[in-house]
Image (tube, rainbow, N blue to C red):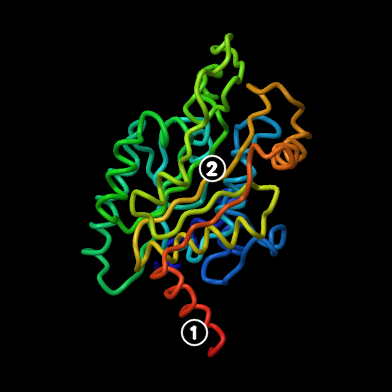
Amino acid sequence: MNKSIFKITPCFEDIMPDEYKELVESDPFGKGLGVSQLGTYKELLEEHPLCAGCGLALSLRLILASLPNPEDTVIVGSTGCSALAFPQVALHNIHSVFGNQNAVASGLKRALKLRFPDKVKDVVVIAGDGATADIGLDMVMQSWFRCENITTIMLDNEAYANTGGQESGMSPQGTVLNMAPKGKKFPKISMPEIARESGCAYVAAISPAQPKRLEKMVRRAILTAREVGPSYVQIFSPCPTNYKFKPQEMVARIKQREKEGFFKSKEYITTEAQEYLAGLEEGKKDE
C-alpha cells in the first residue's frame, strides 16, 4: 500500500481529528514494529467499547501488533463482541454475515491476487467461537479443504457473549451460563485438531497471557498462508462478564486454566510450512 493515501492534505490539517494526526505521524506501517514496542507508537486499536477486562480486547490488540505487514492487511470479521471493536481498528476491515467470514475472505484473497499480482496482500479472518466453530464451521472448513491462502484466528471466549451468555461449542463441558442453567452436556470442540486434519498448514493455540509467543504464532500463521496454505490460530480470550469474574483477574484466570490442564498452548506445522518458515528465517539472517 502506498502510504501517501493516508497523508493529510495541507489545507485540511487544521480540521483533522487529533487521533488521525497522531496515526499519520506515529504509525507502525512499514517499520517492522511488534509486541515488544507496544507503547512506543500509535497502535491500530486503542479505544474500544468492549467490557473492562475483556480477553477479546487484549487479544485483538496483540494480534494487530503482530501483523507482519499491517499496511497490506485486510481483516474480515463477523458478528459478535469483536465486531464492536472493528470500527476503532485503523486497518481495512470487512464485517461479514454471521458465520460467512471465511467465504468472504476466500473471495477477497482471490480478488486481491488478481488486482495486485506482484504484491502480497494478507487476508486475516478474526471471529469468535460462535462464528468459527458453530454457525460458521461449514464455511470455515470448506475454506481449509480448498486450501485458501488465508489465516483464520478464533477469539475463543467460550460463549455467545454478546447475546447474553449462551453456551457455544467451545464452552467447557459442565459450564453453567446465563442461558445454560443445567450446564453444557458435551466437551469443548477440538478445533486445532480439526484444523490440522482439514488441511491447515499451520495451526496454533495460545493465550494473551503469553504475548511474545502469541506474536510469533500469529506471524507464522500469516506468513504460512501467503505461500503454503491455510492457517489457524485459536486464542483463549476469557469473558469476565458472562463467566462472572473480576476484570483484573483475566490473565490470572488464563494461568489457572493452564495449571488445571483445561487450556494449553500447542502448535502443529506441516513439513512444507516448516521448510518455508525456516527459509524466511535464513533469509533474515543473510540481510
Q: Please tell me which residue is depicted at 24% across the width and 50% down the height of the picture.
A: 107
Quadrant in the picture for residue 179: top right
Q: Can you say whether 121 is above or below 46 in the image?
A: below
Circle 1 is placed at which residue position? 283
What's the mark number on residue 80? Answer: none
Q: Earlier in the sequence, mark 1 or mark 2?
A: 2
Quadrant where the N terminus sits is: bottom left
Q: Please tell me which residue is depicted at 48% across the width and 39% down the height of the picture.
A: 190
Q: Nearer the viewer, residue 8 or 47?
A: 47
What's the mark number on residue 88? Answer: 2
Q: CA distance from mark 1 to mark 2?
A: 35 Å
Q: Nearer the viewer, residue 96 or 26?
A: 96
Q: Position of residue 247 (x, y in %)?
A: 74, 31
Helix, strand or loop under label 1:
helix
Binning the other alpha carbons within 10 Å of mark 1 as few (below 14), some (14 to 19) or many (20 upward) gives few
Q: Position of residue 120 (x, y in %)?
A: 36, 68
Q: Nearer the viewer, residue 69 or 203?
A: 203
- Along the horizontal axis of the image, is 18 left or right of 193? right
Quadrant in the picture for residue 248: top right
Q: Position of residue 114 (x, y in %)?
A: 21, 64
* Amino acid on which the number 2 mark rests in the picture: Gln
Q: Can you say whether 124 is above or below 276 in the image?
A: above
Q: Can you say whether 221 is above or below 137 in the image?
A: below
Quadrant where the C terminus sits is: bottom right
Nearest to viewer (mark 1 / mark 2)? 1
Outermost residue, top side: 181
* Amino acid on which the number 1 mark rests in the picture: Gly
Q: Position of residue 136 (x, y in %)?
A: 35, 34
